[in-house]
Amino acid sequence: MIRIHFLPLLCAALLLARTDAFGGEMPSPYPAPESGIRLTPPESAAPFLNEPRLFGARPGSPIQFAICASGERPMKFAAANLPPGLKLDRETGVITGKISRPGAYTFSVQAANSHGKANGTVTLRIGQEICLTPPMGWSSWYSYSGGVSQENILKTARLLVSSGLAQYGYRYVNIDDCWQGARGGKYRAIQPNKRFPDMKAMCREIHTLGLKAGIYSTPWMGTYAGYIGSSSPNPQGDYSSLALPENKRPQPDQLFGNCPGSQRLGAAKVGPVWMVTQDARQWAEWGFDYIKMDWYLIDVPNTERIAADLKKSGRDIVLSVSNSTPFEIAAPISRLTNVWRTTGDIEDHWGSLKKIASSQEKWQPYTRPGHWNDPDMLQIGRLGQVGKANTTFKPTRLTPDEQYFQMSFWAMVSAPLIISCDLEHLDDFTRGILCNREVIAVNQTFYGPSEKVLSQNGCEVWLKPLGKNRTAVGFFNTGNDRQTINVPLSGLRLKSPQNVRDLWKQEDAGTVSREMNVQVNPHGAALFLLEGKNK
């Protein structure tokens, strides 16, 4: 089994070094919290090193890795025994450079401000695997959507930093559909429409902020939103034989009209001329770090071609494929890609969330460092209408308990944590959901896949091994009434006693000798870390 060494953050973050810190027995039943309140404690002004602290790159590829440290700014960063070929920006904590020799490089880092210092380690693994932890970041699809532009992408990038979300690991700024113009340039690649006047400058600014840039395409001739894709009817990249007349296009470059325009006009298929090769070179030259390739049905031959083109591009680019990967090809797809969608598009209501969560168990054996199941984006915060050029946003239709359910479940199954909300008006509750370092640490730590160990009366219990006698345990209630979920330690394959920590409250909950009895709100979740001996 592939294992990532359990990062030192969790030892500090979860405060589990001493048994006597836990006091008496965990209350039975452990009470459910009041609905609608922020459970995550206020953020500290003192520096704290957060996840991720593991990064993968191929030999000789450009490296950019930001030390994730929360706390009051200004902050100074330091590193001891930094590998040759790398340098650290002491003001931002961004590490850049190249390493040609394969291997694992672990070195000490420090973050300091007027309130104190935080020390820890960072590990860089140089080899053929990248994306060693589930990606965290933001996507434009459920926010700016059809109106995505260079201006609002850069605005979001700056907000990720100024809001502090980047300090908790949210690093990717991903453009979804609707950026495309016509083909051109030295590669005859897809060029951006007029809303993106300078892709290279945009990526450069995103990188200067210590973030990473993502983009979107499809191996089809036309995308779901009706823009051109990465194959073509002819070598010239001329799509006019399939396109709508100019006066019938919702936007000038939306050649095939609104969804399902590409399907109606015959563009929703791989065309005679494959153009991913030149598009990948263009994305690499612009400086993109992540690509979402979106088509249906996802298949192995096209995925193999896409993966090969990205590797030949000269840049490490994370490959995410969407949507609805057929389970029958899970094994080869999980080898070829870094991220693969296990579902159709998520929506911000309980029916969608419940359906997706109920389908994830069979996928767990395929997830591992560098390769992650993707049950789609977090429906948390203020969202826009998909496909619209949104300028205003509405709160998610998920209830507070349902938001705790989604974030807890995504953490347990090692899913990418990609948000798509308005960051300009981030409320305190949403921030508490997104910026709980102990919940994020569960998501970012991998010692093996998650497993459902109980399913009864609409309730489930999942466990995730975290190494060093630590186990994350998630309690989930899909029913409409508050329920008490009972599970013996033997059902968790754990020995008595176990020290228990409530991860959302970031506080010790006591010890458990025989069984856990946990009250869970309807459509809600509870998330714990247990430390003791495994059977």
Image (tube, rainbow, N blue to C red):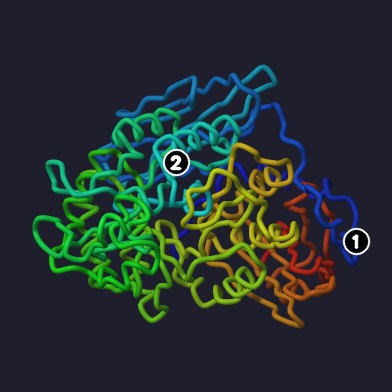
Q: In the rendered view, tell whether residue 114 sits above or below residue 26.
A: above
Percent across and percent down for residue 71 are 65, 28
Q: Is residue 460 left or right of residue 481?
A: left
Identify the residue at image location x=64%, y=61%: 406
Taking depth in this image into account, of 92 and 236 the one nearest to the observer is 236
Image quarter in which the C terminus is found? bottom right
Q: Position of residue 38 (x, y in %)?
A: 78, 47
Name the element at disc 2. Answer: strand
Q: Is 355 rendered above or below residue 165? A: below
Question: Is 71 drawn above or below residue 246 in the view shown?
Answer: above
Tell me if residue 227 can be seen.
Answer: yes
- In the figure, 275 relative to 335: above or below? above
Say which residue label 2 marks: 123
Q: CA distance from mark 2 to mark 1?
A: 39 Å
Residue type at tag 2: Thr
Three-letter amino acid code of the residue under disc 1: Pro
Residue drawn where x is 35% and y is 77% of the image: 329
Residue under the point 80% across and 54% down: 36
Q: Position of residue 208 (x, y in %)?
A: 40, 28
Mark nearer the N terminus (2 vs 1) = 1
Residue 134 visible, this angle: no
Which of the 4 image quarters holds residue 392? top right
- Residue 485: quadrant of the picture: bottom right
- In this view, which residue lies farthest toward the top? 114
Could you tell whether 261 is left or right of 310 in the image? right
If the image is split into quadrants, where does the N terminus sit? bottom left
The circle drawn on residue 27 is 1
**Is the Cβ of the residue at disc 2 closer than 8 Å to that at disc 1?**
no
- SS type, badge 1: loop
Q: Residue at (48%, 41%) from the top-left corner?
A: 171
Label 1 crowd (10 A; few <14 / some 14-19 / many >=20): some
Give left or right: position of 482 versus 385: right
